[in-house]
Image (cartoon, rainbow, N blue to C red):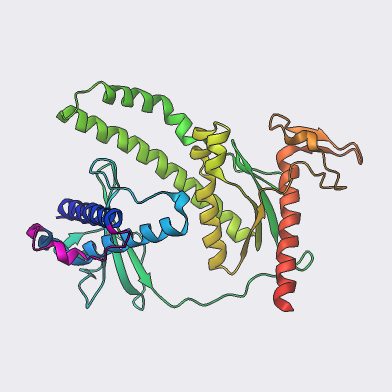
Amino acid sequence: MFIKTFGCVRFIYNRMLSDKRSYYEATGGNLRTTPASYKSEYEWLKEVDSLALANAQLNLENAYKSFFECPERGYPRFKSRHHSRMSYTTNAVNGNIRLEDGDKKIRLPKVGKVKIIVHRSIPEDWKLKSVTVTKEPSGKYYASLLFEYERDKKVKAKPDGDRIRSIGLDFSMHELYRDSNGDGPGYPGYYRKAEERLKKEQRKLSNMKKGSNNRKKQKLKVARLHEKVANQRKDFLHKASRRIANAYDVVCVEDLDMKGMSQAMHFGKSVSDNGWGMFLRFVEYKLDEQGKDLVKVAKTYPSSQLCHMCGYRNKGTKDLSIREWTCPVCGTHHDRDWNAAINIRKEGLRIIENKRMIEAS
């Protein structure tokens, strides 16, 4: 039933996109349609959860809205049977979705009871809103449960001299980051460690006949290797972000375009391996839960060029190969990343102080 629902959701998305495109080319207007209008022609759509199809329609409408707001993002594309993410979302209405048997099973529309492993205790006053079922390339199924609940709002930390704990983080290709204290977490580079084994298994996969059972088994083996690397990375980033969020009230970082960096500087594997963007998302929501602040400094700020002692700007340090330099004014010897982290912290505190003054006025 899960596989059938994935297929129906993909089909209705593609069919509605095709009809909307044809209508626009013929009339210049926007075709308004719903999944229900296709069920008389394709009766097998009635066999799956109707709310899953409705959410596919919402996803298409959001894609159209995003395109018209920012055409650079590209026109909505058709979903592929072999390459698109296999998932669907359904909403909780009148108790149609609920946890049963001591949270050991979940009841889903058109599916019934399914055994699950709940990795987190769920308070009784939380209200279930929706569930997203996903099949990973490794063959594992996940159900992501969205709850609504009341949360106590904590007072945001305010910068006032040395009474708040603050830190600056400068992105580092090999360490993940270097902080304003001169420390780094020493990122293990999980993808680089698994790269040789991945090459070997992917070479086997490329030499196998398409459509054969052996190819399907090998594809699953490669997917599990990739999943292991991703889980290792996520575990490391969660622990590193938790340490930062618990220890500091204000965290200052540089607002970098990681996708642009990976493409322009040919750092694709290294940038993807350390997961800086994911790390910042983890830090941000963990700080927000505690009423703390993440401050993003503009990427145009010359953090690595400024001497944090006297403020002298050394434009000769733009070259990334220069890892150390000495200030010609005050004579301070700088480590590039450490100096940048200190400057990012200073600029971040200045930004948040200005924001606080504006709010107060």
Q: Quadrant of residue 353?
A: bottom right
Position of 51 with respect to 269 (left or right) is left
**Per the image, is 321 magenta?**
no
**Per the image, is 38 magenta?**
yes
Closest to the observer, 82 or 341:
82
Closest to the observer, 241 or 86:
86
Quadrant the N terminus occupies: bottom left
- Residue 152 sits above or below residue 131 on the image: below
**Given the current orientation, which residue lies at the most extreme front position?**
27
Is most of the magenta stretch helix, strand or loop?
loop
Which residue does the image show at 31% across and 62% down from the upper left?
Answer: 29
Q: Report if residue 109 is visible in the image.
A: no
Closest to the observer, 182 or 28:
28
Which residue does the image show at 21% across and 32% down from the upper left?
Answer: 217
**Given the current orientation, which residue lies at the most extreme right position?**
329
Q: Position of residue 161 (x, y in %)?
A: 79, 66
- The magenta segment is 27-44
Q: Position of residue 72 (x, y in %)?
A: 47, 49
Q: Quadrant of residue 324?
A: top right
Q: Report if residue 214 is visible in the image.
A: yes
Q: Position of residue 130 (x, y in %)?
A: 30, 67
Q: Quadrant of residue 172?
A: top right
Position of 88 with respect to 320 (left or right) is left
Which residue does the image show at 36% across and 78% down from the upper left?
Answer: 125
Quadrant the C terminus occupies: bottom right
Which residue does the image show at 47% across and 55% down from the upper left?
Answer: 70
